[in-house]
Image (spheres, coloured by chain):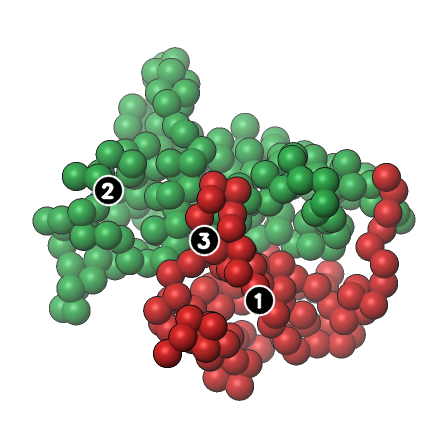
Chain colours: A red, B green
């Protein structure tokens, strides 16, 4: 199986065993080279609409990332996944610019 | 040091109530990274030297030996839950031949790698933009993983992880 295919399968929300909260609607990913030159993945986890990010605890966020990382490892993906989070509402807004 | 730095990271991230300045969010990320970096180095030095107050000069001297990139290499491996054969040669394994790493170690290792990359982006890459909500959640995640690791009972695996933060580069090439 090609690496892209394995990654898609590892991140397939229908199969991925994620904690019930925060609810995830989509995971986007791309290949990435990190600051020390290692091949890696860059993931963007998009929560479901109207998810109150303030209510997500550090432990819940850590558990979510652990589930995603373990799924990648189980599918033989050894690249480290750098995981960012956002909401559909945030994506629709321009990022706060001040500079 | 850790408590002060992680508290400072949160304070900086929350400085702007409405429109967060990127400079503040960048400093918050960087400060959170150094909080976890100093926590791990201090834990590792305590394991090596001892925890008594009159031993702190030796701990502080040893702390200067820790290298960010080597620590990241070690943490990447521990986060993955599987260590290379050269690292675990001769160590006890389970029935499947795996060297088991507690999730508390895997989590703090993963958070360290993640924070180090974000610190690099925060300090050097102006094309990266940071969102306040995510920065605050990352700080909470770091606190949670440090607390979990801190509660983890002292074991050979815990001590081995801390030793690898210093010795990993040499061990993996044996």
Quarter of the figure that contains the C terminus of chain B: top left
Quarter of the figure that contains the N terminus of chain B: top right
Q: CA distance from mark 2 to mark 1?
A: 30 Å
Residue ID at (83%, 68%):
A92
In the rendering, which numbered label is found on residue A39? 3
Mark earlier in primary sequence (1, 3)? 1
Residue ID at (39%, 38%):
B71
Q: Are marks 1 and 3 on the same chain?
A: yes
In the rendering, which numbered label is found on residue B51? none
Q: Residues within 10 Å of mark 3 (few under 14, many from 20)?
A: some
Residue ID at (48%, 84%):
A15
Q: Indicate the secondary structure of the residue bearing disc 2.
A: helix
Q: Indicate the secondary structure of the residue bearing disc 1.
A: strand
Q: CA distance from mark 3 to mark 2?
A: 19 Å
Looking at the picture, does residue A8 appear above or below residue B29? below
B71 or B60, nearer to the observer: B71
């Amino acid at each position: 199986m090609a690496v892209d295919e394995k990654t898609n399968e590892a991140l397939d929300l229908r199969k991925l065993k994620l904690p019930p909260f925060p609810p995830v609607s989509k995971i986007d990913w791309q290949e990435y080279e990190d600051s020390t030159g290692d091949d890696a993945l860059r993931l963007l986890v998009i929560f479901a609409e109207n998810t109150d990010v303030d209510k997500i605890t550090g432990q819940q966020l850590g558990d979510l990332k652990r589930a995603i990382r373990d799924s990648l490892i189980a599918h033989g993906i050894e690249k480290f996944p750098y995981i960012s989070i956002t909401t559909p509402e945030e994506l629709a807004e321009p990022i706060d610019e001040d500079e | 040091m850790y408590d002060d730095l992680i508290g400072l990271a949160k304070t900086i991230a929350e400085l702007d109530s409405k429109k967060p300045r990127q400079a503040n969010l960048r400093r918050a990320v960087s400060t959170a990274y150094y909080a976890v970096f100093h926590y791990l180095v201090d834990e590792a030095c305590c394991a090596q030297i001892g925890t008594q107050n009159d031993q702190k000069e030796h701990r502080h001297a040893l702390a200067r030996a820790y290298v960010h990139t080597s620590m990241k290499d070690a943490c990447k491996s521990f986060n993955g839950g599987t260590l290379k054969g050269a690292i675990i040669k001769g160590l006890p394994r389970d029935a499947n031949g795996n060297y088991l790493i507690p999730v508390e170690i895997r989590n703090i290792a993963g958070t360290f790698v993640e924070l180090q990359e974000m610190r690099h982006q925060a300090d050097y890459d102006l094309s990266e933009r940071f969102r306040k909500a995510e920065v605050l959640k990352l700080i909470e995640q770091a606190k949670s993983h440090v607390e979990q690791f801190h509660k983890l009972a002292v074991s050979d695996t815990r001590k081995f992880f801390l030793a690898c933060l210093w010795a990993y580069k040499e061990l993996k090439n044996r």
